[in-house]
Amino acid sequence: MTLVSDPIELAVAPAGTHSARNLSLDRTRSFLTILVLIHHAVIPYTYYGHTDPKSFAGFDVIVLATDSFFMAMFFMLSGLFLWPSVAHRRPGVFARDRLIRLGLPFVFAAVTIIPIAYYAIALRQSPELGFGEFWVKTVSEGPWPSGPLWFLWVLLIYSIVGGALYRYSPHALDFINRLSVRAFDRPIVLFVVFVAVAAIVYVPVRVWLGPNHWLEFGPFSVQTSRILLYAAYFFLGAGIGAANIKTGLLSPDGALPNEWWRWALTALLPYCALWGLIYVKREILGNPDGLPASYEASYAVAFVVFSAAITFAILAFFLRFKTSGWSLLDPLQHDAYGIFLVHYAYMLWLQYWLYGYDLPAIAKAGIVFVLGLALSWATTALLRRIPGVALVL
């Protein structure tokens, strides 16, 4: 993904894929980055669970959709160039580079950006609380949330495991790549694999632990039921990108780009099923704390089908409408990683300042998104002027 890609990875992409990656996959990554900001901008103003006096039910539509696929898709995109990236680095160099690109930003953000962000929430509850006191309590006693930056340390682990897998068995993902080649003409082949693998690793864990169980240790946190789901998407992406991209699922000349609207319609079916299950939970079951295993299993199945379908739809859309001209998403590509790193603090503080204003929820969310994006982009541009920082961001 743009958040962690670098020029070396672009340079070692298989022959003939540079333009596809620049114009299709990079725009896909930029689009997902925008979705992250929209997601965080509207959460306080959703109808269910809103934390601001103002709410808008339309935001629930957005949050349910984004939460159900975009992090899994980020992991898939992050895995695409894993194999060629490891292949063109000496042993140990890949792990070192990932530690620099992912580990260092996570550590820095965990002790700076994240406490600054969550201080806005703490002030809502304790207006007299000083930042120094809050910071010390956060890093010493906890809780020490990581916000959206959990993605970095989880991706770091997947990347190192993937790098070790390549060194031990460089052909380990060949079977996925062969399926990708078959999917050049029949994307449904790989779609079924995505759904089946995701169901195997996600449904039982969700039934066992539920959706709200988190694995936490200091700032290292991740939603437990999704650990294997994200790993599956990451390594499926690695298999797709291991070779033959020009003749595989993500070829702009394959069947996938011509079927983008079919995949979009396909995604609507499980998405509507998710809303139907939410209605059952709230209106029929009485919104209990614990839900029957049959309910969790049904929701999990709809979840994995929607996630795979919308992922294919978005990939197909950007492959279908790839042009050599300028796109609104293009300027974002080089700064997307920095925007991802710093945006959360701006979002939470903008929401804090807007809390007492009598504005419609749509207006508040719009202000948070526009200003949050602008401030995050400007901050990233300034940070990249610092010697050495541009190598990380």
Image (spheres, rainbow, N blue to C red):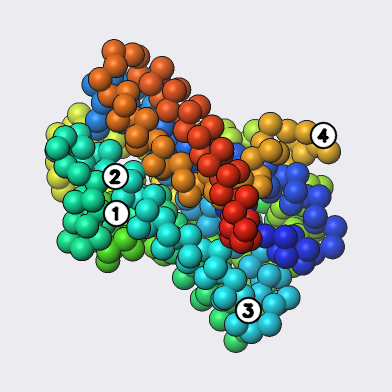
Q: CA distance from mark 1 to mark 2?
A: 8 Å
Residue 349 locus on image (x, y percent): 34, 34
Dot 2 or dot 3, earlier in sequence: 3
Q: Quickly name the residue at label 1.
A: 145
Query: Quick one: label 1 or label 2, which is nearer the N terminus?
Result: 2
Confirm or deny contact between disc 1 and disc 4 (CB under 8 A).
Answer: no
Pointer 3: what residue? 93
Mark closer to the observer (1, 2)? 2
**SS type, badge 4:** loop
Q: Are marks 1 and 2 in contact (CB under 8 Å)?
A: yes
Q: Amino acid at mark 3?
A: Val
Q: Nearer the viewer, residue 387 or 340?
A: 387
* Res 140 quadrant in image: bottom left
Going 58% across and 44% down the picture, which residue do you hit?
382
Name which of mark 1 and mark 3 comes first in the sequence.
3
First along the sequence among labels 4 and 2 = 2
**Residue tagged 2:** 118
Q: Amino acid at mark 4?
A: Gly
Give the residue pinned by disc 4: 325
Give how far apart the Cα atoms at labels 4 and 2 are.
41 Å
Residue 295 appears in the picture as rendered: no
